[in-house]
Image (spheres, rainbow, N blue to C red):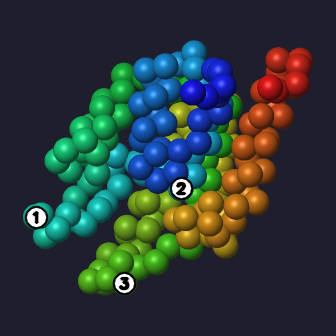
Amino acid sequence: RTRITPPVVFVGHSVGGILARLFVHKYPDSVAGVLLVDPTDEDDLVFNTGVNRWVTVRELDGALGDGARRAAKLRQTDPAPPGDRPLIVIGAGKRVQPPGTTAEQWIQMRSGRDRRVEELSKLSRNSKFIRDPISSHNVQHDNPKLVATAVQELVDGLSRARGAQWP
């Protein structure tokens, strides 16, 4: 059993970005702040080997596609679910061109992905976006200090707002 008591700072990486958004919607009082680390957006492209083509995450079958479709629908009905909760979004600055894509395809895919990651910072009216030029998708491995600093920034800001020391 854990001794973690809400509200918490929720950190989501990659697909965890979709999960974080769904969690905030379902349990808004349990989340004090959110950190999204190169989060996946429901409109990001992934290669689906089942159909042998690129599809958006929301076009996938199964739980991941279901979650992405729910997140997309919630975004339409409530474009800022965190409200004024602090939100930091960190985007990767280095992306690797997927095998089998042309340079032109890759430019479009990368610019679209970078734009969508940055747009996720607009989910809160109290947000910050950071593009880390030295990190790939796995920012937490490439630049763990940046991720730790972002978590600390959220905790410190929440502590100051509450006028007390964060537990």
Amino acid on which the number 3 mark rests in the picture: Ala
Q: Which residue is mark 3?
A: 103
Residue at 46 percent across and 34 percent down: it is 21
Residue at 20 percent across and 50 percent down: it is 60
Q: Quadrant of the C terminus?
A: top right
Q: Is residue 56 left or right of residue 91?
A: left
Disc 2 element: loop
Amino acid on which the number 2 mark rests in the picture: Asp
Q: Nearer the viewer, mark 2 or mark 3?
A: 2
Tell me how far mark 1 sits from mark 2, CA to CA.
26 Å
Q: Are marks 1 and 3 in contact (CB under 8 Å)?
A: no
Residues packed near mark 2 inside 10 Å, few (<14), some (14 to 19) or many (20 plus):
many
Q: Earlier in the sequence, mark 2 or mark 3?
A: 2
Disc 3 element: helix
Residue 77 on image: x %, y %: 36, 22
Q: Is residue 111 left or right of residue 11?
A: left
- Visible residue check, residue 36: yes
Give me the disc on residue 51: 1
Q: Residue lying farthest left?
A: 51
Q: Would you place residue 64 above or below residue 96 in this image?
A: above
Amino acid on which the number 1 mark rests in the picture: Val
Q: Which residue is mark 2?
A: 38
Image quadrant in which you'd find residue 102 = bottom left
Q: Quadrant of the N terminus?
A: top right
Residue at 89 percent across and 18 percent down: it is 163
Q: Would you place residue 125 above or below residue 18 in this image?
A: above
Q: Is residue 68 left or right of residue 165?
A: left
Q: Earlier in the sequence, mark 1 or mark 3?
A: 1
